Image: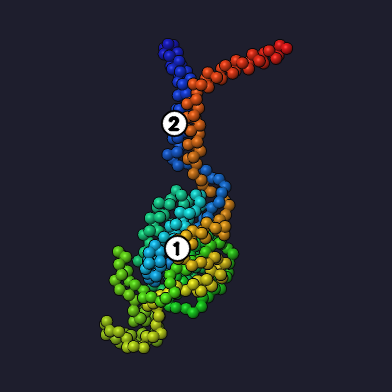
Amino acid sequence: MKMRVLRALAIAHAWTRAGAGCYLLAALLLLPVWAEPTLRLPGKVQDTLFVIDISESMNVPDAEFPAPRTSRLELAKAATREAMAALNCGSRVSLALFAGEHAVTLFEPLEICRHFPAIEQVVSRLSTHMRWIGDSRIEVGLTHAIEEAQAHKLNVVFISYGDEMPHKSAPRVTALEAMRGKIRGAVFVVGGDTPLPVPRVDGNGQVTGYWSPEEAVKEGFYPNLLAQVDSLEPGQKAPQGMLDEVGEHLSAARPAYLEALAKAAGLEFGRLNQPREAVAVVSGPGLVQEARAERDARWVFALLAFVMSLAGWFWPKLSEILPNARKSMMLAWKKGFSE
């Protein structure tokens, strides 16, 4: 038994002299990496709630990115993905959909680097079929979005074409003015200035038809014309001039309307033509803040493992140099003491 213990000690000593102990320690230091450890460290973050309008008018193909005749919604989704990808690790993000009067949050704020693949998949699958109502009151929806962002201590980025259903000449900004200064953020308008027909799109993204003025009246936007439209035969068009005042079947961006809302709420405003414009805003000083947040700590263990691997590599030389250096120091010390 004694011989076995002595043999084991001899083997361990040989391993240590060869640096095997350093290599073993390096391997053990790499084990926590698989658990994706994090540390709470100070740094720059951009905690943000992204709100995307999913009303049917977002299907209008008057955006120019990534190609001509791209729908407004596709540009909004591309801008959201790239803006999220530009955020610093440790930043928290959430996503909300706007329709009617509400901005509905899809998930609680998540750390962007760890959860980006899942968040990106959610953004890529957004569709106007997810809307729960056809009307659109943007000033109320923006107010709710700000309240949601404030509750989760987030900035807000709101993307819409800026038109309301039914059309409204001027916004009511009383509620938004009461929210001024409570959070930071930006409002983006997407779409062209020329009124275009609002397409109906199926689940595969294919256009199946367009809204007509008769349908806009039947939605209740013009009660004074409803009886005349109801008297028409199925498929029959209204006589020329009868529905000239109807415009809800057409859609154009209204930047002045959205800018007034943004100004009332104390938010930045911009026109979204390409994703880089959203990236510039979320990465700019206006939305960046210093905060302690979860950071990826895998590099710490990787660095320690690298150092131990280097020690193992140089250990044979060190095992020769260190004893000789220690012996020389002891002799020098004794000589100085004797003198």
Q: Earlier in the sequence, mark 2 or mark 1?
A: 2
Q: Residue 97 location, x and y as percent?
A: 43, 64
Residue under numbered circle 2: 27
Q: In the rendered view, would you say 205 is above or below 197?
A: above
Q: Residue at x 45, y 65 (%)?
A: 273
Q: Residue 317 location, x and y as percent?
A: 51, 21
State the image quarter where residue 102 is shown: bottom left
Left or right of 198, for residue 37: right
Q: In the rendered view, would you say 257 is above or below 272?
A: below
Q: In the rendered view, would you say 32 is above or below 62?
A: above
Closest to the camera, between mark 2 and mark 1, is 1
Q: Residue at x 40, y 67 (%)?
A: 63
Can residue 137 be seen in this snapshot?
no
Which residue type does callout 1 highlight? Gln
Q: In the rendered view, would you say 239 is above or below 325?
A: below
- Given residues 40 and 132, the one toward you in this image is 40
Q: Residue at x 56, y 73 (%)?
A: 174
Q: Residue 69 location, x and y as percent?
A: 37, 68
Mark 2 and 1 residues: CB-CB less than 8 Å, in contact? no
Q: Residues within 10 Å of mark 2 (few under 14, many from 20)?
A: some
Q: Quadrant of the C terminus?
A: top right
Q: In what element is the residue under mark 2?
A: helix
- Given residues 312 and 58, the one toward you in this image is 312
- Image mark count: 2
Measure how far apart labels 2 and 1 are at the Cα level.
47 Å
Q: Residue at x 54, y 52 (%)?
A: 45
Can residue 23 be seen in this snapshot?
yes
Residue under numbered circle 1: 274
